[in-house]
Amino acid sequence: MKRALHPGRHANTVLWLLLAAVTAFLSQYGRDIARSFDARWLLKVPFAMRIPMKAEIGAFMKWLVDEAHFGPVTFTDLTRAVAWAIDQPYRLVRALLESGFVQGQGNDAVQILPPLSWLAVVFVVMAIGHYVRSWKLAVFVGGCFLYLAVFGQWDSAMITLASIVIAVPFGVVGGLLLGIGGYRWRWFERLLVPVLDLMQTVPIFAYLVPILFLFGFGPVSALVATVIYAMPPMVRITMLALRSVPDEIREFGRMVGCTRHQMTWRVLIPSAVPMLMVGVNQVIMLSLNMVIIASMIGAGGLGYDVLTSLRRLDIGGGLEAGIAIVVLAVALDRLSQAFAERSLPSRQPENASFLRRFPRMTMSVAVIAGLAVAGLFWPFLQDYPAGGEITTGPFWQDLVRAINVNFFDQLEAAKTFMLLSFLIPVKRFLLSLPWPWVVFLITLAGWQLGRWKLALLCFLLSMFIAVNGLWGKAMVTIYLCGVSVVIAALIGIPLGILAAGNERAGRIIGGFIDTLQTLPSFVYLIPVVMLFRVGDFSAMIAVILYALAPAVRYTAHGIRAIDPQLVEAGVVSGCTRGQLLGRIRLPLALPEIMLGINQTIMLALSMLVITALVGTRDLGQEVYIALTKADTGRGIVAGVSVAFIAIMADRLIAAAAARTRRRLGLA
Amino acid sequence: MPQKPVKLVCRNIWKLFGEGAERFLHDRPEPPDAAEIEAAGLIGAVRDATIEVHEGEIFVIMGLSGSGKSTLIRCLSRLVEPTAGEILFEGRNLLAASEREMIEIRRHKMGMVFQHFALLPHLSVLQNVAFPLEVQGVDRRRREERAREVIRLVGLQGREDNFPRELSGGQQQRVGIARSLAVEPELWFLDEPFSALDPLIRREMQDEFLRLQNVLRKTIVFITHDFDEAIRLADRIAIMKDGAVIQTASPEELVLAPVNDYVAEFTRHIPRAKVLTLGSVMVPGPPSGPVAGILAADTRVEAAADKVEAATLPYGVADEDGNIIGTVDGRIIVDVLIGRETRRESRQ
């Protein structure tokens, strides 16, 4: 009955079934057919079609660095000036936290002033925790920092912290200014949004290549990359926050005769502060994530420890540094979230003494000074005594060894089973499809969901990948991403349903997911590599862990957001629990779930590039190789290809979700 | 009552939303009707509205949601740019004022109270009230002194250091009122100031508002969707429907002579004793016999009811000069109170 009402949909189903059959046939016999017609171009993009984009970008970058100039100022001068401007505050903070103030170079260096004592840093962090929320938070973050000292991660953690302390203000202020610009001028926003889209979909490593080329190996490059990476969400949130200031507030500002400047800085920005703080939290977390990854181009710190341990297969060391990253991440996340949610304290009387008005600041200064002096006499106050450090490295090493010894067969069996029955067949299937057919399918999907605009986009983007000779690697990327997303969805959607239906489960799952999301992507690699060594399977597990969160979150949100009356209507009609889920909740939550899957795909793609470190053979590897060879053209082309896959997936799914929502009348 | 001078005039104001609205209006000799506007793909928020606001009066613009009243009040302060028309404020054409001049006018001559208070969440009560002065660059001591003064005026003393979120809705709107009065505006806009409040608080705030106006004597444009509120507060009311002003009159005139069924529908359930004056319900002509006393013609029926009812003789009704121009008796009062057609009304 129902189907008869939708003849278009019916025909559509038949069409796609037919296409699926053709696809299956082609993957099985396409190779033979192509061979029998002597049409090798069906299997491999012919060289005649390829565009030497890599070489051209490489040449352009070379020109930029060697020759480009604006009047008397060469481009290199410009990058040096930027580097200098970032380097100064960084040196200061790093001296304060880690190295101390020194005079002279290399071995002749003499320390003039020691860095802050570890106790002083712990005290200051606790003071901040108390200031933004409560004693409980103060004790919690103090404990986190104590952990760093006791477990011997202090120096590396302080280097990482120094990078964040510098990168975050740059990211926040830059993002705020760009966001204000986008809010004020429509044309600027039109320019900004596609750039932000690209910035957020281009894999992290691809940023690193040109930055490495322009700024050289070292902390400055890492900071530049970090700021670029962490800024986009701040820009978006700023625009959104300014837009969602109530109209009445804006009108009020105009009625009292605010100038434009007063309007922005006295009315709009202060009113938007609670939402802007969410952006600050994002910048902090993304900066931490990036600072860890940027250890590859010289950021040093905890990320560098993880990286070297991974390379040495020093499992204990890697895990120790990894846990330190987690501890630092959790501490910073809690602090910045508490700061975002903090309600303004009632005003202190103005005639109160400085001490009364700023008790924590006064005490912190006193403690810092006191400990600096005391540290001269009792060194353990200055540096955490080496004798008191606890190293957990051997313990982890033994634990992993024990697992590997005792459960080797089981782990190996699971891995082999997954590889043989799932991963390899999918990979083979995708790789044996003739590329023109895939391009055709993607374009057709674009046409069906978004007419010629989307079809054209899909066609151009997929052809870009083809003509750059990256087809095979792109297929491996899609395969790895695809299987990971399928499994993440299979785990995540039921978890989301559970979280939505049961408050206690919701809290537990929510907490678990929140923690997963605060971890820098790097960290996921460590346990996976320890248990499954390198290869596609390890990459898949890491990607699933990293990309799980949105599948759970969007599903839970989609189900919670359903109008309770609709569910009640179902209950009154006598639906069983299963029917309620299958007939009412899931169909209505479908658009939301699709968006969750979309996010999962985005995260999976960004994680894939990192998993190149554990030996996948996809576009991520291409970027990684480009990074190690500082081959800008190669890195950018491969990075952009990943971004294009992400953009196609995003647009197609968004269009499908919008269509579903229209059909359900939820638009 | 002698008419006070006109403070604000808006003549033939149009506000059409949509592409090419200005040309659409410009191109035709006759003003377009609703169907034509819709056919052109435009939305007629305000259509050909004309009002005059006299100095010191409470002018209420009343209309249901979507009637264009909010857009009209925003046109008056140029928060929304009218598509066509003329706005004269103290004889000066506001639409010709530059951005800079508009800022000056808004800073010194206009104040506005908003439906949802529009308080700045990051500022204390004192800072919120002082904000308009701060924007003008008034020094801190003077602006806080003035702010404390208006805070006292609205009865919020002792709350200066609280933040808006720590106050109840009624208190927040008192802050909004204090803030709009801080610059001593000559023209006071109130955009549904009490609509977001509970009914009991709303009444209290209306009384408070009338008390303030008794002291301040501002020229007020007050927006509401609540006809009872309009009747209670207004010197004159403009009723809007679908963007057009359909009648402008005093509350009494509206009740006695609604221009069409739409207006009549609003007035039907209004307790007439609160609106009608003795002058409009009396039997005109000199009294035929002895009278119990003399009452002024502009006394509301409600206020005189007890007295007239209790007396056995009718009361004489006197105009402003003290001439007796008619009489009222208990029967007339009862007619009004129970909503029976009075003789005077049936003749109109």
Image (cartoon, grey):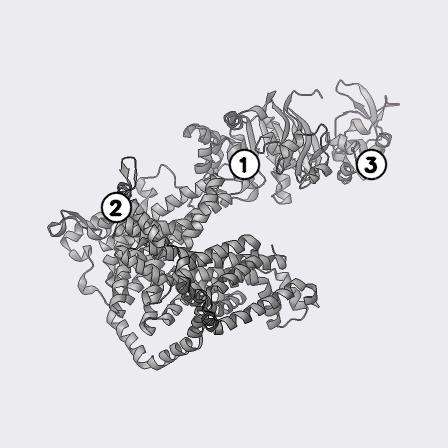
Q: Amino acid at mark 2?
A: Asp
Q: Which mark is residue B334?
A: 3
Image location (x, y in percent) of residue A103:
14, 46
Q: Quadrant of the C terminus of chain A?
A: bottom right
Name the secondary structure under disc 3. Answer: helix
**Chain identity of mark 2:** A
Regarding residue B256, the answer to whether it shows in the image is yes
Asked whether the residues under marks 2 and 1 belong to the same chain, the reply is yes
Q: What is the CA distance from the residue labelled 2 to the residue labelled 3?
A: 89 Å
Which residue is depicted at the point 70% across and 66% down?
A4
**Chain identity of mark 3:** B
Classify 10 Å Cα crowding around label 3: few (below 14), some (14-19), many (20 and above). some
- Is residue B75 found left or right of A442 in the rendered image? right
In-front residue for pair B205/B307: B205
Picture quarter containing residue B170? top right
The residue positioned farthest toward the left in the image shown? A108
Classify 10 Å Cα crowding around label 2: few (below 14), some (14-19), many (20 and above). some
Give the residue at mark 1: A251
Picture quarter containing residue A420? bottom left
**Chain identity of mark 1:** A
Q: What is the CA distance from the residue labelled 1 to the residue labelled 3?
A: 48 Å
- Is residue A330 found left or right of A460 in the rendered image? left
Name the secondary structure under disc 1. Answer: helix
In-front residue for pair A211/A104: A211
Q: Which residues are magenta?
A: B287-299
> Is residue A357 magenta-colored?
no
